Amino acid sequence: MQTTLPCCIEVSPAYVPKVRYTLRMLLEPLGLGPIWVSREELRNNSLYYGHAGESLPPATHVLKAAPDAEDYFAESQPYPASRAIWKTWQGLRYPVLFYADGTPDLVASSFFWLSGWQEHVINRRDEHGRFPHAASLQAELDTTGLPVVDLYRAQLQQLLQARGLNAKLRGWSDRSWAFCPTIDVDYLRKWRKGMIYREVVEYFLLNRRRCRLAARSTRLGAFLQDLMRRGDVFQEAILRMNACIRSLGTGTVFLKAAAHGPQDVHYKLHTPFLRQVMNEWRRDGFEIALHPSYHAHTHATYMRNERAALTACTGVAPVSVRQHYLRWDALRTPLLQAGTGFKIDSTLGFSETAGFRHGTSLPFRHFDVSRNEALELWEMPLVIMDSALFNRQGLHVEAAIEETSQLLDMCMRFGGVAVGLWHNVLWDEMDFPGWGRHFEETLAWAADHGAYIASLQSVLGGWLRYPVQPSAGTHGPQPV
């Protein structure tokens, strides 16, 4: 049950929505529901944020607003890393971005990360239109593995508790942290025509001078053995992943419902195999979510039609969504998702590395910078992805497991949720060696450390203490 906390904000009108949004994201996880009051309405156990904290009731906690924060957020300039001031809290060294009279401005600093502000003011993108980790402030400051907003919140919690407020982190069911295993089904079968061509022509013929004869012979034997086996390794991976997750809890499976470009591999939702496995998912309490096609992150018609197609197949409008290739347009994609009826996104991890893209391990609502308002769309931040660890970071399996356990430990430390993404390529040791072991050991680590293991929808609904469901009338195509 939330305790109401009177909050007075004295900043410019354009800055007020940003402050209100950030205070909600900082306070509500502590069981404190802010109510907005004037200076004259402040009482004991209240909070003030602004530039002039004089003549306030003695029990008011004052958060000073940095004098340069409003000007910074009114412009479109990248944040200079050299301005950050480094502090240490409980052995963790972390950056504060804004200060007021030598006091950290936790609100302005948190808004920078939670809103994804850097993605609005830095134009650099990769070949898929994604914001690259190399362009981020996290990369400059070397804080990608640190949930800095959670550190800010922990200090605010400490300050409020010293004032006598019962500021306690919300739990996850009966656990102190949560883990969400998710599966992206990009391909339903491994040995499609294109894959066979790639294997035979590109590997054995075009690469004949790069590979020694013994290596080519070994690869050819593995290829033929895999090609002739009964069943498909990618479908077998889905069943095995389901069994591993089901033994500990539930998870979320992202399915594709269309293909509109060369990066999309088409498969039908009504195949006998998928019908069988969907029945198992429903029986076991798994969540079936949408993995939109490559261009859908900025294409309203694609998004609507694909959600409608998945709804028609499952009979339930999907609540959660994750964009294919983690494609994300900060101005357009969240509005499109919310307008199509989604309540939860879990796209926002870096495509090249594991870590905290928005500086937090806790769910947060999206903020629409262009409209200067919060959206009714929650982000479940993506912390680890198999292809980032193995393909982009180039880690071997032991190093991937070690980095993953460190990130999960950070989520556990701050009472957050760790979302992990795996593709149904696991245990294909010919092309993805060690990926299956990483999945199994990550699940085991989360279970051994007391995580609540469940789907995105179940975890967020329990944390918010109300079910996360589709809006009325979203079981078919919706206007955006």
Image: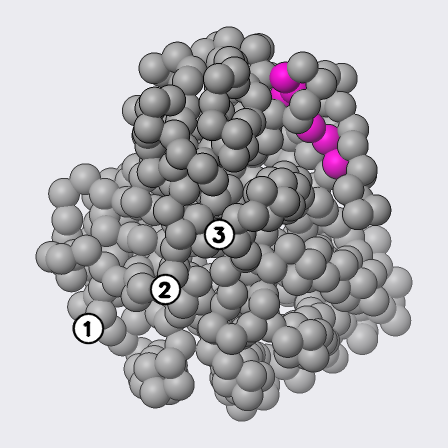
Write the start and end of the magenta stretch as one range.
94-100
Determine the secondary structure under disc 2.
loop
Residue wearing tag 3: 29
Q: Position of residue 211 (x, y in %)?
A: 84, 59
The residue lying furthest to the left in this view is 473
In the rendered view, how is the structure colored?
one colour
The residue lying furthest to the bottom in this view is 230
**Left or right of residue 77: residue 253:** left
Q: Residue 315 carries which label?
A: 1
Asked whether 28 or 353 is in front, the reply is 28
Determine the secondary structure under disc 3.
helix
Determine the secondary structure under disc 1.
loop
Residue pictured at 65% horizontal, 73% vertical: 446
- Residue 236 seen from this side: no
Q: In which quarter of the image is the N terminus?
A: bottom left
Q: Where is residue 421 in the image (x, y as percent from the top left)?
A: 56, 62
Q: Distance between the residues labelled 2 and 1?
A: 25 Å
Q: Which of marks 2 and 1 is nearer the N terminus?
A: 1
Q: Earlier in the sequence, mark 2 or mark 3?
A: 3
Residue pictured at 33% horizontal, 82% vertical: 282
- Residue 237 seen from this side: yes
Which mark is in front, 1 or 3? 3
Q: Where is residue 438 in the image (x, y as percent from the top left)?
A: 71, 71
Identify whether 326 is placed above or below 409: above
Q: In which quarter of the image is the C terminus?
A: top left
Q: How far apart are marks 1 and 3 (CA)?
A: 33 Å
Residue wearing tag 2: 465
